[in-house]
Image (cartoon, coloured by chain):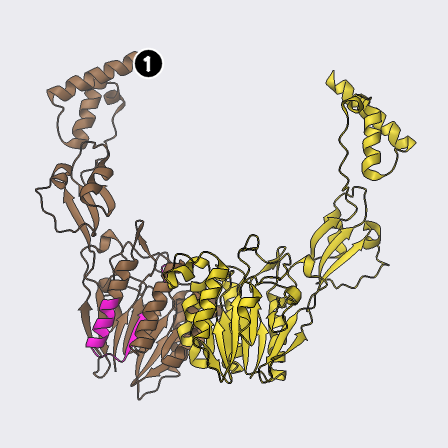
Chain colours: A yellow, B brown
Amino acid sequence: MRFLHTADWHIGKKLHGYDLLTEQRDAYRQIKAIALAEKVDAVVIAGDLYDRALPGEDAVAVLDQMLVDLNRQEHLPILAISGNHDSAVRLGYGREWFASTHFYLKTTVAEGLHPVTVGDTQFFLLPYFEPFAVRQLFADDDIRTVTQAMVRLVAAMKATFDPAKKHVLVAHFFAAGSQHSDSETLVQVGGLNAVPTDLLRDFDYVALGHLHRKEALQSEPTMKYSGSPLKFSTSEAADTKGVWIVDTATTPVTVTFKPLTPLHDLVVLQDSFDHLMDSQQQYPVTKEDFVTIELTDTAPISNVMQRLKTRFPRIIELKRVNQLTVTPKVMTTQETQRDPLTLMGDFFEQVTQHELTAQQRTWAKAALQAAEKGEN
Amino acid sequence: MRFLHTADWHIGKKLHGYDLLTEQRDAYRQIKAIALAEKVDAVVIAGDLYDRALPGEDAVAVLDQMLVDLNRQEHLPILAISGNHDSAVRLGYGREWFASTHFYLKTTVAEGLHPVTVGDTQFFLLPYFEPFAVRQLFADDDIRTVTQAMVRLVAAMKATFDPAKKHVLVAHFFAAGSQHSDSETLVQVGGLNAVPTDLLRDFDYVALGHLHRKEALQSEPTMKYSGSPLKFSTSEAADTKGVWIVDTATTPVTVTFKPLTPLHDLVVLQDSFDHLMDSQQQYPVTKEDFVTIELTDTAPISNVMQRLKTRFPRIIELKRVNQLTVTPKVMTTQETQRDPLTLMGDFFEQVTQHELTAQQRTWAKAALQAAEKGEN
């Protein structure tokens, strides 16, 4: 069989305050178009369909429309799990009916142990879980970490493997060796909760969700994060977002990347304020693109955000790349007893790599005198 | 055909802070048992399935279980609408799938115009609506009130009447001539938004939700509020809750009431504090019943709620029935110049209908003297 692997839709997410529903609808349309063009037999969504456990009404309506369209209008089977951003209960409301049209949505670990067979493949749909849920399921108090839980879960899954079929795991966790971007919610601290990829070798393909870059896990050709359909942070600005098309007819399975074209891109512009405000300067952005600005200026600029927004209305971040990053050296007692003007001059030189100019020295002297007067 | 008419489940409602999910599950079990014993062809739920637009996860899980059980396990068709307490969007998530097993859930006015036919009957499932939705639907700015909206809606419904069928309207509004209890949320002020029952005469039966007492609309034998399955306020303490069984085979339709037995009742106890606290006194309540206490005492009682709860753990209201309700008469200028003790005695007599006793007079005198000293 042939399926499309996507994840981390995060419907309802705001990008630094900007609503993304328009962009998310557009990404959905592209995903559907790819699914149809590639004649896939199913669409896999590996968790985080919503951005929040308690999505807004508009997000509920939009996700419902997408799922209805994909499954009931286009008659594409859907294989989906809840992620750490979803409320398993809220997302799962009504799921007993969904299966009637081959929309398989699993929101509890126990459900993940019973494979869904589509064509030549058994799909194990394992939602995001906390170790306690698996501890409870197996009534085993020794299960404390995600890895310990996965050892038990994978063993249980393998017990139901039909050797005549291919085996695909759909899951939502942090796989050992994978790399974070800035837009994922860290649900694990340190490496304790990372699942070693060795554990997952018996699956023909592992369709992962949770990390937002498709490059997050590079070492494993048949274990993939699809990444999010949209860029959700500046750290993803250079990424190409998309979906995987997985064909299980070959051994190993064939995995092909299909890119999505952002309706409104996320672009980083690094330049000086004057250049950025100069209408003669051309930048590769539209009024609706999301822009992170890295200002090269060192001088203070008043109303900087307000003024930049007149040219770039959807600024999501504003940084100073020439911000002072030098840590002043620790001084000896003798050094601290120098006169204030010398101290100020030394400090200025340390952090800017420049001596005070004559004009700056005059200002500094006047400021210090005013400060001393204020003290007396 | 034969159907069961219920409404106003308000899953997730708290009764003065007490969770009702246990009681709501029990009421559901009874409703299902009646539906099965009466061999109905469908269950009608006339709105307010949830208590809140944003129900808690536990409420979502409980309602989902009930609907799955009724429709998917017991294979009973369900005909339901959203009420003013439901979020049409949240309740309606997934409803495109529900119809595959004859669970018809309508959450927009437009959907209400297309009848669902079950057996010999056309059901018009009209969710709770605001006039603006109907104004928009018909693109007619003159539609300002619920009644104006209903004139248009009923006309549109009648245009689709199949004369060979019976016609049932399922709706959630305030019908003219009906009476409120204390547990409904007032969504209308005055009579402007009450729908005249005359408008609804062409339906063989009108299955209403919104008001919580089945007696709310007495004048119309074929237009009924089912009332809520549980008592939600002290004003409903004496009510018998239940469901209607409607048989459309006869003309007019046959309507029979089937009572529900409260798992934990709501009981009003009117007595003195000493009696209520006396373990020799027997009251017709269990530890889990919800109790409204009407204290007959006039004297102050310290820690009254805390002490009463040792005998009646689930007190939902505490009232004083002998509270002073007399409005002191307006005095003449001459009367206000009497000495303070006389004034106090007159006031006491007015509000208690008793003269001060010798002991009370002594206390009053001492108190007045202390007050006078305080002034100087």
| Residue in view at x 28 percent, y 54 percent | B182
Res B56 seen here: yes
Quadrant that contains the N terminus of chain B? bottom left
Say whether residue B44 is magenta: yes
Quadrant that contains the C terminus of chain B? top left
Pointer 1 local density, CA inside 10 Å: few below 14, some 14–19, many at least 20? few
Pinpoint residue A49: horizontal percent, then vertical percent.
Answer: 53, 66
> Image quadrant of residue B24?
bottom left
Residue A202 versus residue B168: which sits nearer the camera? A202
Residue matched to label 1: B375
Pinpoint residue B230: horizontal percent, then vertical percent.
Answer: 25, 60
* Residue found farthest to the left: B280
> Image quadrant of residue A4?
bottom right
| Residue in view at x 38 percent, y 63 percent | A137
Q: Is residue A259 left or right of residue A40?
A: right
Position of A121 relative to A276 (above/below): below
Q: Is residue A180 left or right of residue B53?
A: right
Q: Is residue A67 left or right of residue A330?
A: left
* Residue found farthest to the bottom: B164
Pinpoint residue A240: horizontal percent, then vertical percent.
Answer: 70, 68
| Label 1 SS | helix
Magenta residue span: B29-54
Residue under mark 1: which chain is it in? B
Position of A228 relative to A204 (above/below): above
Query: Which kind of residue does numbered mark 1 sit on?
Result: Glu
